[in-house]
Image: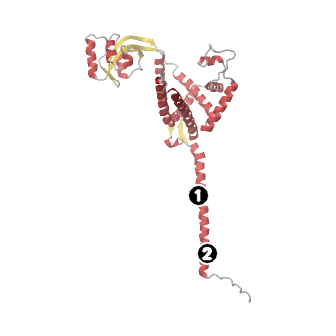
Amino acid sequence: MAKRVKRPRYTNRRTVSRLQREARMRQWLYIGAAALFSVILILIGWGFYTERVIRPRRIVAEVHGDIIRQQEYERALNFREYTTSLYLNNLLNQRSQFAGIEGQEFLVEYIDQELQRGQDEFAMLPTIVLEELIEDRIIRQEAARQGITVTEDEVQRELEEQFGYYRDPEDAETAGLVDPDVITDTAEAMTHEDFVAYSTSYFLAIRQATGFSEQDFRRLMESELYRSKVEQTLTADLPTAAEQVRALHILVETEEEAEQVLERLAEGEAFEDLARELSIDTFSGQEGGDLGWFAQGYMVNPFEEAAFALAPGETSGIVETQFGFHIIRVLEREADRPLEEAELEHQRSIILDTWYYEQKIAEGIEVYWDPSMAPS
């Protein structure tokens, strides 16, 4: 029997319409997928461009036309966070070594205080670093006005000494790093080769961890040298002697207690004995209320005004300050007494703090920073 020939199937109008719709649907799906893929690529590219090009060039602050950009700020902040973390970890290791050892309680307490201070500083680093960068620009501009320079050799020496390498052994002795009685011909001081190897390893580790380069570190050393020179110039005319008084005081909590102190003094009791008995300033109270010599600008205003209004041997009335109620007696007074180192440093700090504050509030300094600029 002959085989039956299979006739081809012919599509009707309805079938054609359905096939056309399916073809169009597939076409639209392909177009939609391509469009979606393009959008994703654009978003990825824009994010990359924003993160790598726009964000680093964002302006964080401007100091008289000198711009601080996001990239510089982030590197400095990453470096400070990294080094502060190392310091805190070192403190934790020291604490674990000394905790529980009899006789080391004071050292553990000191380490705890340093840990708390370091943790507080770490939390404030985003704004601390910003302030330091602004101050750096202010200092460099002041140095330019005054003709102050820092040479490459000065930066190199500062860098070397940061790593403990001294070209001249006498410099190491002056810095207190070497005991002159222990130095012998065979003493193993850091050589230049040691310095190069150690510093190279350090800069590599820092760059990998934070992006902070050797050039950034050198600029940091340069900044410190500029700061030192400018601050020395600003305080060069600081007087080394001033009018001073030597005074005793008794500090109590209430005005009623202060009145009772005056009554007992009027009855003839010794000022020193009452200070030891009653003063809540226990440090000076142990010394009979003796505050030693001090110049103007060292004490709080009401106390200082009262003390410098007294002649030697005179006793004040009740003087109120934020610390409580004082009775003051001046023992001695000199018109031109040399200032001690602590007082010189105090006066120096006042001058510099005032100068930095005036510079920062002056016109020409713009801060655009906000918390989102701190790297997460």
Q: Residue furthest bottom?
A: 1
Task: Residue under label 2, please give it.
Answer: 20
Residue beneath the point at 54% across and 32% down:
89
- Relative horizontal placement of residue 159, taking residue 257 as reference (left or right): right
Task: Residue under label 1, please give it.
Answer: 39
Say the numbered circle drawn on residue 154.
none
Q: Residue furthest right?
A: 2
Residue beneath the point at 49% across and 24% down:
101
- Relative horizontal placement of residue 338, taking residue 190 as reference (left or right): left
**Type of residue at label 2?**
Gln
Can residue 80 be seen here?
A: yes
- Relative horizontal placement of residue 138, taking residue 288 as reference (left or right): right
Residue 179 picture location, percent across and down: 61, 16
Q: How is the image coloured?
A: secondary structure
Residue beneath the point at 38% across and 17% down:
284
Residue 97 picture location, percent across and down: 53, 27
Residue beneath the point at 59% across and 74% down:
21
Check whether the beta carbons of the residues at disc 1 and disc 2 lie within 8 A of each other: no
Residue 99 picture location, percent across and down: 49, 27
Count all numbered tags in the image, as a single digit.
2
Which callout, 1 or 2, points to the residue nearer the camera?
A: 2
Q: Quadrant of residue 276?
A: top left
Q: Earlier in the sequence, mark 1 or mark 2?
A: 2
Secondary element type, mark 2 = helix
Near mark 2 (Cα within 10 A), the count class, few <14, some 14-19 or many ≥20, is few
